[in-house]
Amino acid sequence: MRRRLRDPFHVRRQPGFFWQGVCIILPAALLVALGLWSLRQDRLLAEHEATEQARKLATDLIQVALPRTFSLALPAPELVRRFQANPGRAEADPLWPYAASPSNRVAFLVNDQGELLYPPPEQSWPDPQPLDNEDLDDTAANGWEAIQSSLRLGDNPAQVIDALDRFIQQNPPDSYAAAATFQLGLLRERSGNLAEAQKSFDAVLDRYGSVASEAGLPWRVFAEWRLLLMAAQSHNERRRAELAQSLAAYAVLNPLPTSAGVLAKLSNLTPANTQVVAGWRQVWATHERARWFYDLNVQTGIMGPVFNTLPHWISDDADGHWCIMPVSGVGYRWITGMSEPEVDKLVHDAMAAFSLPPYLGLTMDIAGHRIGTTGSVTNPLAVASGEDAPGKGIPGFKATVFLSHPDALYARQRTRTRWFGSMIAAAAISVLVGFWAAWRAFHREQQLSEMKSNFVSSVSHELRAPIASVRLLAEELEDRRAPEPVKDREYHHFIVQECRRLSALIENVLDFSRHEQGRKQYEFEPTDLTALVQDTARLMRNYGADRQIQVATEIRGEVIPVEADGRALQQVLVNLADNAIKHSPQGATITLGLEYPPPSAVPAGTRSRPDQVLLWVEDHGEGIPAEEQGKIFERFYRRGSELRRETPGVGLGLAIVKYVTEAHGGRISIRSAVGQGSRFTVELPCNHSPES
């Protein structure tokens, strides 16, 4: 019994597609199931995460960020008094951080009774301290009166200087000795004896610096001022800086109505030391603001033995609300004040250190005054207060973290849903792409199989006709009893022609195989294209004569040797001429053309020719439709169906033409229209010299 066997390849192909689909779809299905389960847990997980975040944010803000931002480290009164006794530079002032910072903050030091300790309270003009001659004996009193009289009358300065020296040697009281020494320095300075004048002023500083003058100010101020003027004249920058520093420190730490003017005059007098005085002017402005703030607190009536040690707020008509933050010590209190905008800025700076999620809001309460709110206080999640962590937080500060945008909280859930949806969509797209790729590969395999079948069919057909002709002619010659020279010659001619046709067909197939496998090699050498075109025309005339087709040549331009593979280019011309003969009507003419670039296109003084050499074959056949002109260079492509083809060939000739042209660095183009013939043009560079 006969059994019919199925194609084993067909049996195995279907399970392959099936299992590929299963392998692609199964991960997508697992992702869908996992996503649905995860989305059910997302809402509770989001709420739990938000609560934990809120608790940590509130605690860190109260215990870490705010204490660091509202740093209130200020020196004890002993250090303040030490600075006042030996001030040094302006940067050592206890309130320098407030002077150097542009922030709207002030601070002052008071004792337990609410009296201002620092900055020093502003004094009225000191009481005059007139000299009393009763403190002198008669001789010294007479001498002093004589000196004052000589100074008023403008007597000889040398005599007055001698009188002052004798008076100082009598060891008068310090008030008279300081005045006499200073007068001595002035007279010596006016006399031009600057060195001796400087010694006198230095003596005032060393011996009588703290002695009050008749104006009530210490003599050191007047002596330093004269020394500063002298240093300005002598360009002693170091000395000028020291004196300017001392005078500025005295003006700031002993505030008088004239202190601001003294500082301004010092700046103008010592432009080279402006920075030294500028620091003290900053300190002066800070001290003035601190004294104003102290007066504001006194006016509100909160200064005194009973003082609120917690942060609280006071109001000023001009500057609005101020936050008072006291720091108490034994026998003293530092009082710091910040304007409401400054507090708001500091709070926001502290909050900026935290990455607050968009769904959380934060508000701060300082002494019952709300500030720093970033949203509507609904659904509070966590509250932290300075009283909850003594030593870490600031009393009176409270932070509240609340859920401000529930939609933003659950936006993460929606985002996760979109991500899972995207993953599912990506999986589905992967499935479609996989199936499309498999189908395309299968379809391509079918096309290749069909092309192979067509190729085998075409080659078989092309081989069968010449072989049959050769066989019939050979049998005719064998069976003939009497030789017929004319017919024998004709038969031999046909046999040779058919053998050439077979050789050309086989050579095309072999060349195509070499091109496809990348094994085709070219031998580039200087080639006479004119001779090549003429030889090819002679070769094709016999073939054209059999079809009553004439082959003509047309050569233009000056002959130029070109680096090329002559045999490969002749194959190009033969293939193009063969196609032209096949598709031309009887009695037509085909033309093999060659056109060199004109001499004007060649730059003077160089051997390179930038233009191109044109090889072309033109016929007057049926032409090629525009929609098929891009396909005719594809391998195995032939116009029309396989059953209606009237011209021989396997569809490799033009493909080989394209391969060879591109190997020479050129390109091939076509100009054709239905019913008007075709012209194939090969453009080759003149200076092309590739490696063989």
Image (cartoon, rainbow, N blue to C red):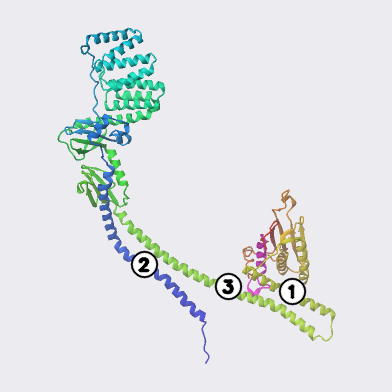
Q: Is residue 226 magenta-colored? A: no
Q: How far across and down, in percent of the image, does residue 437 sit?
A: 50, 69
The verdict on residue 648 being magenta is yes
Viewer-closest of 588 and 272: 272
Counting labels gives: 3
Q: Distance of mark 1 from mark 3, alpha carbons?
A: 29 Å
| Distance CA(mark 2)–CA(mark 3) | 40 Å
- Which residue occupies the extreme left position in the image? 306
| Labelled disc at residue 622 | none
Report the residue at 31% width, 49% height from top.
354
Neighbourhood count class around disc 3 (C-alpha, 10 Å): few under 14, some 14–19, many 20 upward:
few
Q: Earlier in the sequence, mark 1 or mark 3?
A: 3
Callout 1 amino acid: Arg
Secondary structure of the residue carrying numbered label 2: helix
Question: In the image, 99: left or right of 437?
Answer: left
Q: What residue did someone put label 1 on?
A: 500
Name the element at disc 1. helix
Residue of label 3? 448
Q: Tag 2: residue type?
A: Val
In the image, what residue type sits under mark 3?
Leu
Q: Is residue 283 above or below residue 564?
A: above
Q: Using a 10 Å C-alpha cutoff, classify the residue at mark 2 as few (fewer than 14 neighbours), some (14 to 19) or many (20 or more).
A: some
The answer, for residue 574, to whether it is visible in the render is: yes
Residue 143 is drawn in which quadrant?
top left
Magenta region, residue range: 640-665
> Residue beneath label 2, please?
32
Left or right: 375, with 653 as reference point: left
